[in-house]
Amino acid sequence: MNPQIPTTEAPRTSPTTEAAAETRAAAPTDRLVVEDGRWITNWQPENSEFWEGPGRPTARRNLIWSVFCEFLGFAVWQLWSVTVVFLPLVGFDLTTSEQFWLVSLPPLVGATLRVPYSFMVAMIGGRNWTIISALLLLIPTIAMALTLGNPETPTWALFAIAAAAGFGGGNFSSSMANITYFYPAKEKGAALGVNAAGGNLGVAVAQFTVPIVVTAFAFGALQPNLPAAGLFWIPFILLAAWGARKYMHNLSHAKNDIKGSLSALKEKHLWIISLIYIGTFGSFMGFGSVFPTLINIQFPEFSSFQLLGAALSLAFLGPLVGSLARPFGGKLADRIGGARVTIASFLAMAGITAAVVLTLSMANFWIYLLLFLALFTLTGVANGSSYRMIPVVFKLSVDPADRVGHERKASSALGLIGAIGAYGGFAIPQILRISNESTGSFDTAFWVFAACYVALAGLTWAVYMRPGTVFARANV
């Protein structure tokens, strides 16, 4: 317990007991009422006296540990994106198709887990679930440490371990759902932006760290030390679980909005924006997952693991610039409209993917890297601008007489769209795999991506920018 924040301890059996209800009715504003299990029963972020008293520092501390746990979730989620390219160097006999499946399975599982993860906060408490979700990351990391030193490990076991890395992908939804309860409406957007950006940076850090770790811990050997790719993260995961247990809180008023979620699923705009978000966030995750593999295949001159490690250590720049560009996309959307920024980003992304194909014959690594950095930057901008569109669209599209209301639907849609968009992390590597198997190159896949970006730009314009529509008048 932080001694600088006054608290009142009270025995607790359940946050919905009669005693808890009486405690909430008193609603003191100068201290926290914390029951057994670190449940806060008088959380009042919209009360300025409470917020400027014990509220803000408590929320900030929960945000810090939430960001750290989510950051590790993203890092573990993307471990296989960079580890897989080293597997043949240590004796694993994998086809190109199997390598693409290994980088596709974590995004597939992570996207699927995002929906149930988002409900766990209200079911068992944000602090409690953060501890559990952090400890779940030990499963794929310990498994990597135990198996990647043995080339005889069957491929099905590698697939299972890669799928378990998807636990990290679900952390985003539970972390965002938890933090949204802590902050007042006027500061919610900034807090969620910090939470999201901090998590996304885990992709870049994992891709930067793993090549260095497996090379540095090779101890002069001619092969990378792949078990270190899993071992490295275990102390940080244990620290995150300890910190969540010691410093975070559960909020008794956090409730699941199942009705809002079911109602949001009936809204056509949830599905339209989900498709757009697959093109933005899905592209960020998909190219983030597959970029190291593409470098390995397109530039075979990096044959030794030292040269490969040096080349791959630059791959992290893609997810890094994409993560940093996301807040800029949101701010730009606030100024000139989310649909306008999203359309411009899609058209630029189409041009970049076309340029990737047209410059492949040059076999120039630096041109290849620069084009992908531009592509990642655009996905980040489009992530921010398209996500900003969601609450505005639902405010304009929902019938005012609707009992669920646009705010509840928009809140539910944010989580659902984030989950659906993450499936792009699975789709992009698989389209690249199919293209390579069918034609012997990735050219067809990149032309497909370019065509999809143009189509998504057209869809965004037709629905949200076409003159005469309510969305165009509101500059969505």
Image (cartoon, rainbow, N blue to C red):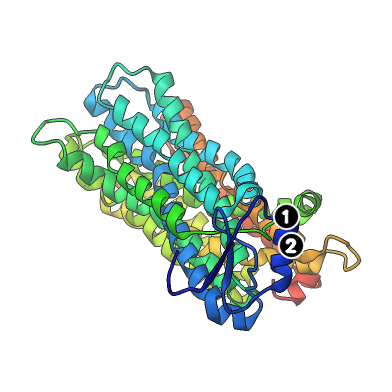
Frontmost residue, 238 versus 467: 238
In the structure shown, which secondary structural element does the residue marked by tag 2 occupy? helix
Residue at x 31% of width, y 34% of height: 85
Circle number at residue 285? none
Q: Which residue is mark 1?
A: 16
Using residue 404 as the reference point, say whether residue 244 is left or right of it.
Answer: left
- Label 1 environment density (alpha carbons within 10 Å; few <14, some 14–19, many ≥20): few
The image quarter containing residue 474 is bottom right
Observer able to see residue 335: no
Residue at x 43% of width, y 37% of height: 442
Q: Are marks 1 and 2 in contact (CB under 8 Å)?
A: yes
Q: Which residue is mark 2?
A: 21
Residue 309 in percent (x, y) is at: 22, 43
In the structure shown, which secondary structural element does the residue marked by tag 1 occupy? loop
Amino acid type assigned to the residue bearing label 2 in the image: Ala
Residue 261 in percent (x, y) is at: 75, 51
